[in-house]
Image: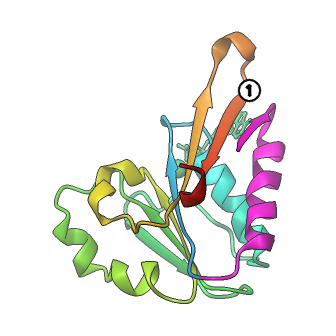
Amino acid sequence: MIYETMNPEETRALGKKMAEEARGGEVIALDGDLGCGKTVFTQGFADGLGITEPVTSPTFTILQSYTGGRLPLYHFDVYRIEDIDEMDEIGYEDCFYGEGVSLVEWASQIGELMPEDTIYVTIRKDPVRGFGYRKITVLRKDEK
Ligand code: ADP
Ligand code: MG
């Protein structure tokens, strides 16, 4: 499925809608360049789960957990990961294979750890279409 957004609010709304449809157990890979909107999408997603805590980029911590919503949200940012063992150390398996939803910014960095039924969300800018334009591709297993 391909979506096009023209501003952060629309990307946030898309994340929120996906969260409202989430049943728990989903792993969502977020890829795209720095500043494309991965964290904005995650903020909308958190909102859709009813999480009121502010969601920021967990760049220096790899994992930030939010338990105040309808489902637990595990927000990963694996941009700075150097060794895949760091994922084991933070207990990623309990998140990926648990009851909550995992959102993984820069998931392609840890491609081999992503479950088979990962939902891939890829965000692309296109300067020709304007500063706020984003093309957001959502790929589920049955659509591959
Ligand atoms: P990332 O986490 O991918 O590095 P962020 O979500 O932190 O990116 O930042 C995205 C930036 O792009 C924000 O400053 C946001 O306001 C801006 N932006 C402009 N247009 C959009 C859009 N359509 N969707 C998402 N963010 C947008
Ligand atoms: Mg980010």
Q: Secondary structure at mark 1?
A: loop
- Of 18 and 58, nearer the camera is 18
Residue 77 locus on image (x, y percent): 43, 59
Judging by the rendered image, the residue that carries numbered circle 1 is 133
Residue 87, image quadrant: bottom left
| Magenta span contains residue 85 | no
Residue 9 appears left or right of 67:
right
Residue 140, image quadrant: bottom right
Rendered position, 131 above or below 3? above
Mark 1, other Cα within 10 Å: few <14 / some 14–19 / many ≥20: some
Residue 126 locus on image (x, y percent): 64, 19
Q: Which residues are magenta?
A: 1-24
- Of 61 and 67, nearer the camera is 67
Residue 79 appears left or right of 101:
left
Residue 136, image quadrant: top right
Residue lying at the far top in this picture: please name it. 128
Residue 132 appears left or right of 125:
right
Rendered position, 19 above or below 8? below
Rendered position, 83 above or below 123? below
Residue 24 locus on image (x, y percent): 63, 82
Screen quadrant of the N terminus = top right
Determine the residue positioned at 39% across, 87% down.
94
Determine the residue positioned at 70% across, 70% down.
46
Q: The disc labelled 1 sits on which kind of residue?
A: Tyr
Determine the residue positioned at 56% across, 81% down.
25
Count of marks, rendered view: 1
Determine the residue positioned at 38% across, 67% down.
61
Badge 1 residue CB within 8 Å of ligand 1: yes
Residue 55 locus on image (x, y percent): 63, 66
